Amino acid sequence: MFRLIRLLCSLAVCFCTVGLGAQPVAVPFSERPAIENILLEERLEVLLPRLMREQGIDLWLVIAREYNDDPVFLSLVPKPRFTARRTTMLLFHDRGPDAGVERLTISRYPLGTLYEAAWEGGDLSAQWQRLAEVVAARQPEKIAVNVSATWPVADGLSHGLYQQLATALGDDLSQRIVSSESLVVRWLETRTPGEVEVWQRAVAIARATIAEAFSDRVITPGVTTLGEVGWFIRERFEAEGLAPWFHPDVNRQWREADYGDTPFLGIGEADQIIRRGDVLHTDVGLCYMGLCTDTQEMAYVLKLGEASAPEGLSNAMAIGNRWQDVLTGEFRTGKSGNEILASAQQKLAALGIDHAIYTHPLGVFGHAPGPTIGMWDNQGPTPGRGDWPLNPMTGYAIEGSVTVAIPEWGGKPAQMKLEQSAVFDGQEVRYLAGRQTRLHLIR
């Protein structure tokens, strides 16, 4: 616990400087594994027992093979680690509230102090036999494995491994196999306070990078292309040792544009030159110390003689913020993603706000498990993933758009496409590093 407190204190210093306007920076590569492992230890010691009991699972198996990892595997093992080695078996056994969750590895290579090795080596047949012995000795009521028809991240046990497991366990124990999908979703969606502190830094870096990209330090109207702005963002992330989970998208809107038949206004060909009077949009995602961000912000390229954006565009941004407030105001513990979507849509329609909602969970993955709240190509209920309930200490990309007629454009529409990373703490939605309320201005 002392190590965690010391970590949070050091990160708090960083965010005090960020709040004062300093450029947020990433922790050096060499320091990241220690931080990630402190956070992982807390998750394994405190969070996992609570979630296993919540889901009524007394034994959970995660089995992965080199080059065919289970999606949940890296979230469970200490760093630095990039993949499973040979066949790697993790076993979690809940021994009760007093004894806690036992963590074993039945694998050829050790996993440090967070796991107890339960196998002394041998061939693959001996490894499966040892796993069966360990499971049989604990006589679990349920043996949860990662198979799921709904959640890709909970479907990591390959068909071949499943067959070998069932054979090794035998008829009696294999009858106790159940899906771990609910446990996997809860494990991947839930954040600890320490993780939120780390996450804030990642989001602050993303937003600061966008602010620099959408400035005259990077953009020269009439010269700079959309693709050059996208690569500036990408290369800045690479220089900081941050992994983008998609290439940055940059696109432009302008008064005379013809966008064709598309739900999204904007043209994003890489060789398009940025012009004065353009409204710019970018979509950026990075991953840092095991947590991903997703951010969309807007800019305006001032025309000669202009000192600010046209009032209609500034008003459109304010309407976008109003859309965010209405949506996040519907977040309540226990409500499903589909219920949040429907209630927000009803209120936004009453306000006359032309909008689309495509908000998604965020965390270990950019498109993470949890309650889907609309999709860009489906503004109705999403079966399965949209039915998942909202839980405290879970993260979201508050994503969507509003379409507003701009008087200065002769009533033609512009779209504010907004997305900010946030955490629902059980009471309210809190943006991890603020949100955009004014257009970035490019002179």
Image (cartoon, rainbow, N blue to C red):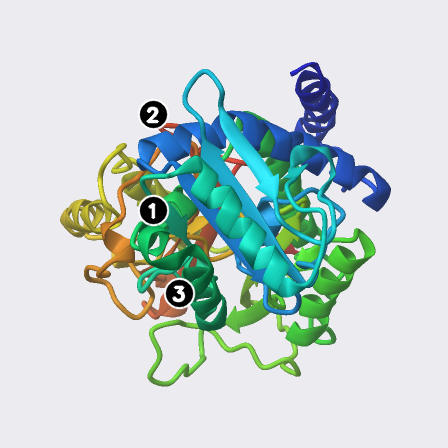
- Residue 80 percent location from the top left of the image: 76, 47
Q: CA distance from mark 1 to mark 3?
A: 41 Å
Q: CA distance from mark 1 to mark 2?
A: 23 Å
> For residue 429, which quarter of the picture?
top left
Q: In the image, what residue occupies the spot 59% across and 68% down?
A: 68
Q: Is residue 376 left or right of residue 257?
A: left
Type of amino acid under label 1: Ser
Q: Which element type, helix, strand or loop, lies under badge 1?
A: helix
Residue 443 appears anywhere in the view: no
Residue 339 appears anywhere in the view: yes
Q: Is residue 415 left or right of residue 290?
A: left
Do the CB atoms of the residues marked 3 and 2 lie less than 8 Å apart? no
Q: Which is closer to the viewer, label 1 or label 3?
A: 1
Q: Is residue 429 left or right of residue 383?
A: right
Type of amino acid under label 3: Ala
Q: Which mark is residue 182?
A: 1
- Residue 292 percent location from the top left of the image: 58, 50
Q: State the residue position of label 3.
A: 414
Q: Is residue 125 left or right of residue 148?
A: right
Q: Which is closer to the viewer, label 1 or label 2?
A: 1
Q: State the residue position of label 2.
A: 427
- Residue 172 percent location from the top left of the image: 32, 52
Which quadrant, please, contains the C terminus? bottom right
Q: Which is closer to the viewer, label 3 or label 2?
A: 2
- Residue 223 percent location from the top left of the image: 74, 76
> For residue 328, which quarter of the picture?
top left
